[in-house]
Image (spheres, rainbow, N blue to C red):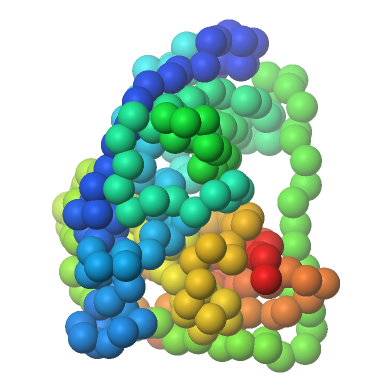
């Protein structure tokens, strides 16, 4: 069987050291569209090393080298063309510093769920500073088409219903035609986001934006427009990747304030508000 769930979840966690500089953070923020207007104080906190703030979603690119490629993990022998990023969650313990070295990163396969026609591989990772200060925990759900039906657990349901009333905040975020080309410089080199021929072979008219870029774009919009620009207020952020987004489209972020949390839908304006991110929740502090 291509996926040996017991072997995958029973393997020892992978650990290693990671580091980043303010240049890495700024490049990541630019990949999310930060810097417009270039001299605006609200944008400079993302793009200028003086008093640089770090969006918590930087965690999704900070520790990618430790886990290695998905197919290199014990018990995982799959066709990467059958892989889709299904969901992402970050739990923030302390604000990410603008630069760091000697950060201990750990990654493991926490679960493998059986969805019938697909398997879902749950990857968990964490990071802490040299002095033991915990930075974040993250959880990624990876769908592998055609690998279900092995008799495993289906996994928990995580459906989030937004209120029926109009959104409390509606934020439109324009993106550039080169958005994916810039974002991929932070480490995701999948040709699906750059090569028109590869994208067509995968069934798309043109390269699509990285799901994790949409994830970061959405949080930036929420921080800037709902949380007073304070990245340290974000405590937990999770989503499901429900649809595609093309660079150059306008991303519409709808936010409902409900039970001390922010419930969010992200959609593409030009395609009749086609859903991009669903079941999205931000938990935040004062």
Give residue 31's quadrant in the image: bottom left
Q: Quadrant of the C terminus?
A: bottom right
* Residue at the image position 56 percent from the left and 88 percent from the top: 170
Task: Give above or below for 249 relative to 67.
Answer: below
Give residue 138's quadrant in the image: top right
Task: Give above or below for 9 relative to 253.
Answer: above
| Number of marks | 0
* Residue at the image position 58 percent from the left and 81 percent from the top: 226
From this viewpoint, which residue is outermost toward the right? 259
Give residue 208's quadrant in the image: bottom left
Task: Give above or below for 41 relative to 45.
Answer: below
Residue 37 at what x, y percent from top left? Answer: 24, 87
Left-right relation of 266 to 14: right
Q: Quadrant of the N terminus?
A: top right
Q: Nearer the viewer, residue 213 or 272?
A: 213
* Residue at the image position 63 percent from the left and 55 percent from the top: 236
Left-right relation of 22 to 107: left
Q: Please say whether residue 212 is visible from this viewpoint.
A: no
Q: Please say whether residue 150 is visible from this viewpoint.
A: yes
Residue 270 at what x, y percent from top left? Answer: 41, 85
């Amino acid at each position: 069987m291509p996926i040996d769930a017991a072997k995958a979840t029973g393997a020892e966690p992978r650990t290693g050291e990671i580091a980043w500089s303010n240049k890495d953070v700024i490049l990541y923020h630019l990949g999310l569209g930060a810097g417009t207007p270039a001299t605006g104080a609200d944008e400079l906190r993302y793009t200028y090393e003086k008093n640089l703030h770090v969006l918590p979603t930087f965690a999704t690119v900070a520790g990618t080298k430790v886990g290695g490629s998905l197919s290199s993990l014990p018990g995982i022998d799959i066709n990467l063309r059958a892989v889709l990023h299904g969901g992402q969650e970050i739990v923030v313990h302390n604000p990410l510093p603008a630069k760091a070295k000697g950060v201990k990163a750990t990654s493991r396969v926490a679960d493998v769920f059986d969805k019938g026609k697909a398997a879902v591989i749950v990857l968990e990772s964490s990071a802490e500073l040299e002095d033991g200060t915990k930075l974040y925990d993250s959880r990624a759900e990876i769908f592998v088409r055609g690998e279900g039906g092995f008799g495993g657990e289906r996994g928990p349901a995580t459906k989030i219903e937004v209120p029926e009333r109009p959104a409390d905040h509606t934020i439109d975020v324009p993106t550039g035609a080169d958005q994916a080309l810039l974002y991929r410089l932070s480490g995701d080199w999948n040709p699906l986001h750059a090569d028109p021929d590869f994208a067509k072979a995968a069934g798309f008219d043109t390269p699509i934006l990285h799901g994790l870029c949409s994830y970061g774009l959405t949080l930036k919009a929420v921080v800037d427009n709902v949380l007073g620009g304070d990245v340290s207020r974000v405590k937990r952020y999770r989503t499901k990747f429900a649809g595609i987004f093309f660079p150059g489209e306008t991303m519409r972020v709808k936010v409902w304030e409900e039970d001390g949390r922010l419930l969010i839908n992200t959609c593409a304006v030009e395609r009749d508000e086609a859903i991009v991110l669903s079941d999205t929740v931000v938990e935040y502090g004062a």
